[in-house]
Amino acid sequence: MAWTLDDSRPIWPQLSQQLARQIIAGVYPPGSRLPSVRELAAEAGVNPNTMQRALVQLEQENLAKADRTAGRLVTQDVAALEAARLREAEAVIRDYFEAMAALGYTGEQAVQLLKEEFQ
Amino acid sequence: MLFKLLKYDFRAMWKQFSLIWGAALVLALVNRFSIFWDVDDHVIGLSDTTASGITIFAFIAVLAAMFVIAVIFVVNRFSKGLLGNEGYLMHTLPVRPWELVLSKLICGTVTWIGCGVVALLSPFIMAPVNWLELIQFSFWSEAFRGIFHGVMKHPGVLVLLAEFCLVILSLLVLFIASMYLAMAVGHLFSRHRRLISVAVFIGLYILIVNIYGRVFSVRFVQALMNMATVNAYGSMLTASAIMLIPAAAFLAVVCWILENKLNLE
Amino acid sequence: MSDYLMECHGLYKSYGLRAALRGVDLEVGPGCIVGLLGPNGSGKTTLIKLLCGLLQPTTGWLTVDGSAIGPYTKSVISYLPDRMYFADWMKATDLFDLFQDFYSDFEYEKALAMCQSLGVEPRDRLKAMSKGTKEKVQLVLVMARKAKLYLLDEPIAGVDPAARDFILRTILTNYNEEGTVLISTHLISDVEKVLDEAIFLKEGKIILHDTVDNIREREGKSVDALFREMFRAEPMEGGEF
């Protein structure tokens, strides 16, 4: 799993976003156990404290829950997962419109091109 | 911790010298049979072949090499082990510098004693003695009985022998301590370390010989002897003390330098 | 007893006329990974050697775990120097035995496991190993200890980029979480993701000591970018690169 991280911004929000995407995509299915902080940190090549902060963020977004015996479990709350998926989609859409505006397209033109591309 | 250091120092010593000591003793044995040939049970003749010449040469070469290697070994164990790259390991172990120095000193002294023992044993091994006789028990039991009785009559001999060993030991320790001090002083400088070490060593040698010559003139020594005891025992003990005191001073300076002025590159 | 794992106060170290450290004040707590960042000659190695007890300060003092530098601090510090420090004729397992003898926190089984995952045959003689493999052995020796303070002097310099990732990953996987890792390097972009805190050392003085996240938020750039900015070589002053 390749982690793309930008050094010029705090890393933990990027980590929690990428973990959220992995959860939504089903890499970590609902109810499954997330790897330990150390394992995830080593995999991503980041400081465990940073990864811990990212995981706490996931908990605050209700995407994961700390379990006393099993470490951290992915939520089984379907509503929370849908809300997260929607959040990510909105971020993608925002990025799309920003990028198109930078190219000089208006909002309507951007929507039009999108429809054409979809057909 | 000192014992652990000794364990590793002795292991290094054994690795280096087991082969040489073995070779020396084996060659001595070989020489016994190549130089002398047993005519019969009681007569042993001198053989005159080139083979014996070669074995004698080999033996002397090994013995000479042994002594040279012994000196190099003691020097290197200190300079490379404590002042070279290995020093990064040694000085970060949870031990005090005096333990490091003492371990090297003990190992170095034992190494030289070992070489001395091998050199002393060799003539006995090479001696034109009939080995068949030697193997018999009666020879040994008689020899031991003779020695035992001799010692019983003059028990002082044992003490004298022990003190003599002490003197030799003190001499070795003083010599090694001087080398360590020379190397430690050389370490204080950033350039020409070897040159300075050699110069310091020569300086120490001259110092010891001259000061001893002057301070411990015959009358002074006799006065000391009278103070200590009235016979040969006392003189040897004083001789040992005379050598061990500066040795201890040298080692104290070495430890101070290692503790306070270490600068590994 | 302070809360800090490592403290330096007014630390000066000069070699003859050349000053390597000019007044360093530093406190580092437990459980974090700290980068000691600076160009060559800035005093990083000097500071680490002072912590190890390989050098004595000219003035000032330093403590580790509340104690002055001595056998106790050496027993809780695991040091990786920038050079090879063992006799060639030994085998890796001999070194493990040595470490087990002297350090009560050395974990033999862990060392063997690390050798396996790094592809090192511990029963080989060091003489027969390549330079890269020897460096791995040294890394294993250091990381297989459950130390309170790990001092890694340029662990990734002179190593190809693929191996750098590997080394950092090995460090991340094996260090004692209650302990602190101090990594000194001038290759900041490779290590910055791994750091909690960064210390910038310039010509023997600390010009910055902050958490990495604070730096990114405040400056809006990576630690590497900030470093390049602050240490930009001034040709007119004959600065070092």
Image (cartoon, rainbow, N blue to C red):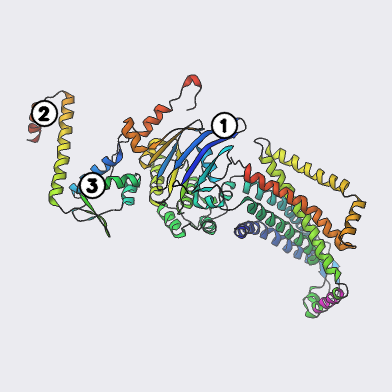
The residue at which mark 1 appears reads as C19
To the question of a shared chain for discs 1 and 3, the answer is no
Please state if C115 lies on the left or on the right of C12 as rendered. Answer: left
- Disc 3 marks a residue whose amino acid type is Leu
Marks 2/3 in contact by CB < 8 Å: the verdict is no
Residue B60 in sight: no
**Which mark is nearer the camera, 2 or 1?**
1
Marks 2/1 in contact by CB < 8 Å: the verdict is no
Where A54 falls versus C226 (above or below)? Answer: below
**What's the residue at 54%, 47% (across, down)?**
C68
- Disc 2 marks a residue whose amino acid type is Ala
**What's the residue at 68%, 36% (across, down)?**
B192
Chain part drawn in magenta: B141-150
Chain on which label 1 sits: C
Please tell me whether the stretch drawn in magenta is mainly helix, strand or loop: helix
Q: Indicate the position of residue B220 as horizontal and vertical percent values.
A: 90, 51
Under circle 2, the secondary element is: helix
The residue at which mark 3 appears reads as A58
Occupied quadrant, residue B241:
bottom right
Please state if B159 lies on the left or on the right of C113 as rendered. Answer: right
Please state if C150 lies on the left or on the right of B245 as rendered. Answer: left
The circle on residue A110 is 2
Classed neighbour count for the residue bearing mark 1: other residues with Cα under 10 Å, few (<14), some (14–19), many (≥20): some
Where C237 falls versus B218 (above or below)? Answer: above
Q: CA distance from mark 2 to mark 1?
A: 63 Å
**What's the residue at 86%, 61% (across, down)?**
B234
